């Protein structure tokens, strides 16, 4: 007999979820930013409370994709594909419900058809397709890899580890706001327990892999009374089965199921005399646990390099991988110098004059494969080029989230350039560490009163990626609300969870970078200063045109101020360039030019005052000359050409003078 009541209930659930998805999509077109992001969060919580609704939500999302495929020729429809894809991925990775094979097949068929979309939409569809296919052939694999990496669980079969650093700018964080945000984010450490995580992975994989044959209740009871070292043994067996199945692909599905059956049998036949035979349910959680988050008030650019070096050293000291343990001692010394360790100082070492003389003319051969890593990002980013490495073999990922306005991004730029410059001289971090950068806008004034200039980069990212605008730019209002005393305790707790959950969503789904071009500013100063309200300055610049012909021009305008802003190719659909506006005493005489480099010089004995990134802390006075040009990547210097193996010749001339870009992760990204 057909259960009509069950069908009606299922239809009601799907109808409610469909309304939620429509609200989520309409939210992207809304101009109101204060409530954006809550629709996605409420939908996520609804599935968390009722895990059985995840399959219904997937059906709703597939129907939406099929509708979009019928209108795929319309450009404005591409934007709505992104939230559907990320929501689909997030449901699949956290679902504890068995997803039918035919539903997986419908999903894959839709994703394959989306590959005809232009970049970057097709890139998001492709990464989603790969994840869905891996989960389809190896159920539980996405959850397992994510938990092991985020929780830094030790496994010899999957050695990826991640660390999250949130760097906040003290200029926009009051003491009260710092305390509120710190409490919200560092609360994630309260839920961390290694053995519990290993039990969750065990039951999750066995449940997803064996389906109805999994005895989840008995597994839960047995694992609760087993010793930690025995749980660790079974955990390693499950991870090994997952990784073997991923390597074998669809052909290894049968062997994967047999291996999981064997593990379940071993667990259930373990010595459990104290086992309570009553049914206690499953330990399977509907969500991936929060990662450990380190919240830091960022006062010094060098702090970032030290954090990364410490993370790398600590990971290597606990590493189970022999290749990492066998690095050279000289590289350990370089990492210690990154940390500012005084133990490497020559004055504290016993000197051996004969040894020093014998090594004076020694030559140390560089690591060719390692130095190529610095150029890999630029080579892979070039449209039409083949990846240098098919898979990123770096086992450590540092996810660095900066909070603030344009000023904190200016500080991040300096720190990033410093790291690249150090790595170009001695490769230490890059070969072991995958650095991922994220940005959450925060201002020190009320959102309606915020100066557009202070948050111009967040606006740029929002225009480039509307899903970033809906979820991350909207956090500015949520964070600002925490700056005041909240009288309602439940409302305060909801705000805290919203911030933490949204940050985790950003870290897990924001994998596509928008590259912000960096510019080098050379400032020449003089001693004599005359304060004036308007002055004649000489300007020399290379004009940017659609024909890409370089024309050097010069003029001597009377101006009381010059504003230089960067226009990335992400928003210009062409090349990066600078917009230079000359302000006159009479606004009607203001002029604007577009260029990629410019030189501004004062005439006679007058001087300029220069402020970088709207940051008063980076103001230079008594300036006579300012030169602005694209910042070249230190990792693509000419010497790199001599360190690359001749086994694979590369057209290096295209990359040696590559402009250094700051890659900020978003949900869509831009391929330049």
Image: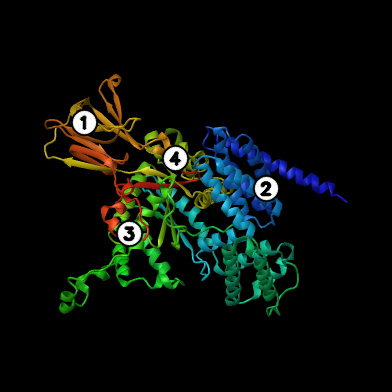
For label 3, count other residues whose C-alpha is less than 10 Å away and answer few (under 14), some (14-19) or many (20+).
some
Q: Which is more foreground, mark 2 or mark 4?
A: 2
Residue 504 % position (x, y): 52, 52
Residue 198 drawn at (x, y percent): 58, 68
Left or right: 509 as drawn, with respect to 548: right
Cα–Cα gap, marks 1 and 2:
60 Å
Residue 581 in which image quadrant: top left
State the SS at label 2: helix
Q: Find the residue positioned furthest to the right.
A: 1
| Mark 3, residue position | 644
* Residue on which disc 4 sits: 461
- N-terminal of the pair, mark 2 or mark 3, is 2
Q: Is residue 129 above or below residue 251?
A: above
In the image, what residue occupies the spot 38% across and 50% down?
378
Q: Secondary structure at mark 3?
A: loop
Marks 3 & 4, CB-CB < 8 Å contact: no
């Amino acid at each position: 007999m057909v259960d009509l009541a069950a069908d009606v209930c299922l239809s009601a659930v799907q109808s409610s979820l469909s309304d939620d998805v429509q609200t989520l999509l309409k939210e992207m077109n809304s101009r109101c930013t204060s409530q954006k992001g809550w629709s996605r969060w409420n939908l996520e919580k609804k599935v968390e409370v009722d895990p059985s609704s995840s399959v219904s939500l997937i059906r709703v999302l597939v129907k939406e994709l099929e509708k979009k495929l019928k209108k795929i020729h319309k450009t404005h429809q591409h934007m709505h594909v992104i939230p559907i894809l990320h929501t689909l991925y997030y449901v699949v990775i956290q679902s504890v419900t068995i997803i039918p094979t035919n539903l997986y097949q419908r999903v894959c068929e839709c994703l394959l058809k989306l590959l005809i979309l232009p970049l970057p939409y097709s890139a998001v569809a492709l990464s989603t397709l790969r994840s869905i296919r891996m989960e389809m052939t190896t159920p539980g694999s996405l959850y397992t890899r994510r938990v092991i990496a985020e929780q830094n669980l030790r496994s010899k079969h999957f050695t990826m580890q991640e660390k999250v650093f949130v760097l906040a700018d003290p200029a926009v964080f009051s003491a009260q706001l710092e305390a509120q945000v710190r409490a919200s984010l560092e609360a994630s450490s309260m839920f961390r327990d290694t053995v519990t995580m290993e039990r969750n992975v065990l039951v999750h994989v066995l449940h997803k892999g064996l389906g109805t044959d999994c005895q989840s209740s008995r597994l839960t009871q047995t694992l609760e009374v087993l010793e930690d070292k025995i749980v660790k043994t079974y955990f390693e067996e499950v991870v090994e089965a997952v990784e073997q199945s991923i390597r074998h692909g669809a052909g290894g599905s049968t062997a994967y199921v047999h291996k999981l059956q064997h593990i379940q049998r071993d667990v259930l036949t373990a010595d459990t005399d104290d086992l309570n035979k009553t049914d206690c349910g499953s330990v399977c959680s509907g969500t991936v646990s929060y990662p450990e988050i380190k919240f830091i008030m960022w006062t010094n650019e060098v702090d970032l390099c030290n954090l990364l070096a410490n993370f790398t050293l600590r990971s290597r000291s606990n590493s189970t991988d022999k290749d990492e343990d066998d690095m050279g001692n000289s590289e350990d010394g370089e990492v210690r110098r990154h940390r500012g360790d005084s133990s490497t100082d020559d004055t504290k070492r016993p000197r051996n004059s004969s040894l020093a003389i014998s090594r004076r003319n020694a030559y140390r051969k560089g690591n060719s494969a390692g130095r190529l890593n610095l150029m890999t990002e630029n080579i892979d980013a070039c449209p039409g080029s083949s990846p240098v490495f098919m898979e990123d073999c770096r086992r450590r990922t540092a996810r660095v989230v900066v909070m603030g306005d344009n000023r904190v991004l200016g500080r991040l730029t300096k720190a990033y350039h410093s790291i690249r410059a150090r790595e170009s001289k001695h490769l230490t971090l890059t070969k072991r560490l995958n650095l991922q950068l994220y940005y959450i806008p925060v201002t020190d004034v009320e959102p309606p009163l915020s100066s557009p200039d202070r948050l111009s980069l967040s606006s740029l990212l929002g225009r480039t990626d509307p899903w970033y605008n809906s979820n991350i730019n909207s956090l500015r209002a949520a964070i600002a609300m925490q700056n005041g005393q909240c009288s309602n305790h439940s409302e305060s707790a909801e705000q805290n969870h919203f911030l933490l959950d949204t940050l985790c969503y950003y870290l897990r789904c924001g994998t596509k970078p928008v590259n912000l071009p960096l510019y080098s500013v050379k400032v020449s100063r003089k001693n004599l200063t005359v304060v004036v309200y308007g002055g004649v300055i000489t300007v020399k610049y290379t004009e940017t045109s659609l024909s890409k012909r370089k024309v050097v021009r010069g003029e001597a305008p009377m101006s009381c101020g010059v504003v230089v802003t960067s226009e990335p190719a992400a928003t210009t659909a062409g090349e990066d360039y600078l917009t230079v506006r000359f302000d006159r005493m009479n606004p009607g005489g203001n002029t604007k030019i577009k260029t990629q480099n410019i030189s501004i010089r004062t005439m006679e004995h007058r001087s300029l005052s220069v402020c970088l990134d709207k940051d008063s802390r980076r103001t230079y006075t008594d300036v006579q000359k300012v030169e602005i040009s694209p910042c070249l990547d230190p990792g693509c210097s000419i010497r790199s050409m001599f360190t690359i193996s001749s086994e694979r010749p590369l057209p290096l001339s295209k990359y040696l003078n590559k402009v250094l870009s700051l890659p900020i992760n978003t949900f869509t990204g831009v391929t330049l």
